[in-house]
Amino acid sequence: MKTSLGIWAFGTMATRFVPGGYQPQWANERTAARVRRAVEGLGDLIDGYEFHYPQELSSENLDEVRDALAGHDIYCIATGLHLDPRFGKGGLVSPDEATRAEALRRTLDAIDFAGDLGAHFIIWPGIEGYNYPFQTPYRESWAWFVDGIGQAAEHARDRGVTIFLEHKNSEPAMKILMRNIGMTLHVIHKLRTHGLDNVKVNMDWQHLIMNGENLAEYAALLAAEELLGHQHANSGWGTFDDDNMVGATAFMETLELAVELRRARYGDNGERLGFDLYPYTEDAVEAVRRSVLHWRFIDSVAERIDGDELREAQARKDAVAAYELVYAALGA
């Protein structure tokens, strides 16, 4: 399976407590230099990179970033509305009509940019929500949201671009509208009624873990619906979007996910394992390297687990027999 990496893993690691970031030495680093640092440090461990538009990648710096990529590709472009204070109260769901129009314009521009590059497009609507009870006209907001995503999907279809929808429950909006897998499927099924079938799901593992959503279960569900579009690999404690190294926590959940991804033949049609990491105080190159190596180990264990014996145990819902096989594959 090929890999991709969100270039934001190489940033300053800003938080609301340390706005300058835990790694302020990178504050003035341009995207091309950041890419060069990643490519030189990671080599062929990463096949391609992902960028927010227009903050990290745009037509203005495309040539120098391509030069820094040294043959690696641009796999995904992601919307960057959440990075602009204008959209603090929402972009596609802003109560201000002009702001909604600008959010849609930027989204369509980003899709055009992705289409020109032959890249996929990620919509993570982290700013599309609210912070307080009584703050938001829910019915209208949901109508604006579905309409905006619908217009984006229609434009993307015309440009030959696949959209990956990514859900999260909170941050930066305290209550993001599309905050779980069910709401994501609701949006996708609404779009399907209008003939738009170019929208799939990007599973950000920590976003699911924060919700108590089972990684393997939802990968199997999405694969059955032909909606398993992309993966953002990471881990965390389950209460915040930690974006820690893969396999650092939630090990068993990640291992079971690896089994289901194999069963779904994820990767056979060009799908990738994208790494979405935020190494606050760690060296970015080493954190990404460790994540890739962890995944390779986890996937190799999954290969040893999945077979007729596991399927027979699952057919009986025999947890004891299943775990005997899991631990045998781990060397017990």
Image (tube, rainbow, N blue to C red):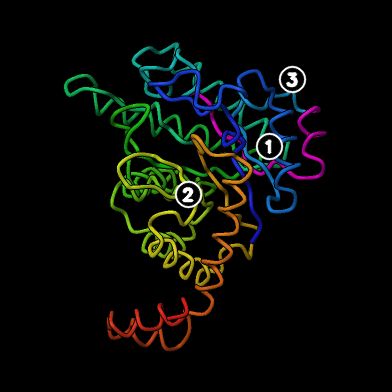
Residue 116 seen in the figure: no
> Mark 3: which amino acid?
Glu
Camera-side residue: 164 or 276? 276
Residue 234: numbered disc: 2
What residue is drawn where x is 54% and y is 47%? 198
Q: CA distance from mark 3 to mark 1?
A: 16 Å
Marks 3 and 2 sit apart, C-alpha to C-alpha, by: 31 Å
Q: In the rendered view, would you say 317 is above or below 289? A: below
Front residue of 200 and 151: 200
Can I make out residue 270 in this image?
Answer: yes
| Residue 138 shown left or right of residue 276 in the figure | left
- Identify the residue shown where x is 43% and y is 61%: 254
- Tell me the element at label 3: loop
Q: Which residue is mark 3?
A: 60
Against 210, is 228 above or below?
Answer: below
Query: Which residues are drawn in magenta?
Result: 63-81
- Mark before the other along the chain sequence, 3 or 1: 3
Which tag, 3 or 2, sits closer to the chain's start?
3
Foreground tag (3 vs 1):
3
- On the image, the x and y values in percent for residue 15 come to 43, 25
Q: Position of residue 12 (x, y in %)?
A: 55, 26
Is residue 117 positioned above or below 81 on the image?
Answer: below
Amino acid identity at mark 2: Asn
What is the count of numbered marks? Answer: 3
Q: Earlier in the sequence, mark 2 or mark 1?
A: 1
Determine contact: label 3, label 2, CB under 8 Å: no
Q: Is residue 73 left or right of residue 123?
A: right
